[in-house]
Image (cartoon, helix red, strand yellow):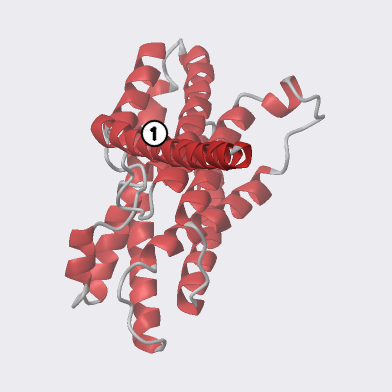
């Protein structure tokens, strides 16, 4: 299982999708896109949204009752629908890197909660109300989706713009249902294994590790990138960026030394005149 976790983190590291933004190709297609195109884009965005899916995976990990699954998923859906639609329509935005960093922390939270971290390590009598936390994190996830959607040409405020946003949101729900169906099939099969309890502990440790990793990646993007589509974490680009910073620092140092020597020579010259 440790190897699986390592492999998962390596795949994330190797991918060029840390920012989970709207690609230039998608933006081009959406220039004349209708409601169906926005619906499809929403579904695609959720299916490829590893941070959203990891959180959902953690939420349903120990849920076995269909009623409970529907309740928690509905609350999450309500939360992200509220902020996705409202923030996008009103043009309320924030730095996408920082929002996604908080979403990454929500993945850590769920893994920690699933492993009874609040009672086992922090001395809480019981964990925080899960339904309330899922709603809160749903609001944050929706805001993250909104920052992405606002990169698209949604048109003037009005019914047409609202329908594009709603279409995108419906697509997100469709993608979410598809992803959840696969997760539930996987979990149902794994729960029948005799080593399920050990797997559950290690899997949620993996969620925590993945959340921390994604958080660091988003913070790196915040510090080093200006666009959600250019995470710039390939080895060559990363090294090149730091080489540029080094060259800038060395150039500043040379300028200061040159300026300092100029003053020194001037001082010696003045001193020579004084002697004469």
Horizontal placement of 233 versus 112: left or right?
Answer: left
Horizontal placement of 61 versus 170: left or right?
Answer: right
Q: Residue at position x 46%, y 77% from top?
A: 89
Horizontal placement of 96 versus 129: left or right?
Answer: left
Q: Which of the image's four quarters has the N terminus?
A: top left
Q: Which of the image's four quarters has the C terminus?
A: top right
Residue 28: give x, y in percent of width and height: 18, 68
Q: Residue at position x 49%, y 40% from top?
A: 256
- Which element is circle 1 on? helix
Residue 228: give x, y in percent of width and height: 36, 53
The answer to whether 70 is drawn above or below residue 172 in the figure is above
Residue 182: give x, y in percent of width and height: 32, 38
Q: Which residue is mark 1?
A: 246
* Residue nearest the observer in this picture, 135 or 7: 7
Within the image, what quadrant is residue 33 found in?
Answer: bottom left
Q: Is residue 7 visible?
A: yes
Within the image, what quadrant is residue 35 found in?
Answer: bottom left
- Determine crowd level at label 1: few under 14, some 14-19, many 20+ residues with C-alpha closer than 10 A: few
């Amino acid at each position: 299982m440790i190897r699986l976790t390592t492999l998962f983190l390596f795949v994330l590291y190797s991918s060029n999708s840390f920012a989970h933004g709207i690609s230039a190709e998608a933006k081009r297609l959406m220039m004349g896109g209708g409601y169906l195109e926005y619906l499809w884009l929403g579904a695609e965005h959720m299916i490829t949204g590893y941070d959203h899916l990891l959180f959902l995976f953690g939420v349903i990990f120990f849920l076995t009752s269909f009623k409970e699954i529907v309740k928690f998923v509905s609350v999450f859906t309500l939360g992200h629908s509220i902020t996705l639609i409202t923030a996008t329509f009103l043009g309320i935005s924030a730095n996408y890197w920082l929002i996604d960093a908080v979403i990454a922390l929500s993945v850590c939270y769920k893994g920690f909660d699933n492993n009874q971290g609040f009672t086992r390590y922090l001395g809480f009598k019981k964990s925080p109300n899960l339904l309330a936390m899922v709603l809160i994190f749903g609001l944050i996830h929706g805001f993250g989706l909104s920052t992405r959607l606002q990169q698209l040409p949604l048109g003037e405020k009005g019914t047409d713009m609202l329908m594009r946003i709603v279409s995108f949101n419906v697509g997100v729900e469709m993608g979410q249902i598809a992803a959840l169906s696969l997760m539930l099939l996987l979990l149902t099969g794994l729960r029948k294994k005799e080593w399920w309890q050990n797997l559950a502990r290690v899997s949620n440790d993996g969620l925590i590790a993945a959340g921390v990793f994604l958080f660091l990646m988003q913070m790196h993007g915040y510090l080093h990138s200006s666009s959600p589509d250019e995470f710039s974490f390939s080895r060559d680009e990363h090294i090149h960026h730091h080489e540029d910073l080094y060259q800038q620092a060395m150039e500043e140092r040379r300028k200061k030394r040159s300026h300092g020597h100029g003053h020194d020579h001037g001082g010696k010259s003045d001193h020579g005149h004084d002697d004469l």
